Amino acid sequence: MDDGAQRDISALLAGVREDVVALTQRQGWQHDYLTRMAHLIGEVGELAQELVAEPTEAAKERIGAEIYDVVWNAVDLGRLLDIDLDKAFATKRRYNQQRTWR
């Protein structure tokens, strides 16, 4: 993986982490990781519902919002479990670059 790609991923994660912390503090949420996982599953379901038909241009905005919700919940899950997502993403990305699928 090149350093530029890793910086882009790290910057994206940092922005979402900031959003996570700000929103959870503002709302007073004190979820545990199982509750956050349930929310993540719900958001994946909402994303799936948006994708049941061929996406129109109008639907793409909703799909993008649902993808953000999925990422937001996944990042919060990582935060709640004290997982270094930058490291995890870099490790998995390196693994996938060596991997073959059949």
Image (tube, rainbow, N blue to C red):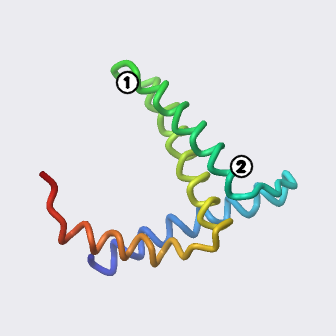
| Residue lying furthest front | 34
Q: Which mark is residue 55?
A: 1
Whole-angstrom CA distance, mark 2 to mark 1, is 30 Å
Q: Which mark is residue 35?
A: 2
Q: Residue at x 49, y 25 (%)?
A: 49
Q: Residue at x 48, y 72 (%)?
A: 10
Left or right, 68 with reference to 82: left
Q: Residue at x 59, y 65 (%)?
A: 78
The amino acid at mark 1 is Pro
Q: Earlier in the sequence, mark 2 or mark 1?
A: 2
Quarter-of-image position of residue 32: bottom right
* Residue 44 or residue 16, whichever sits in front: 44
Quarter-of-image position of residue 56: top left
Q: Badge 2: few (under 14), some or many (20 or more) residues near its Cα, within 10 Å?
A: few
For residue 49, above or below residue 66? above
Left or right, 12 with reference to 79: left
The amino acid at mark 2 is Thr
Quarter-of-image position of residue 83: bottom right
Left or right, 99 with reference to 62: left
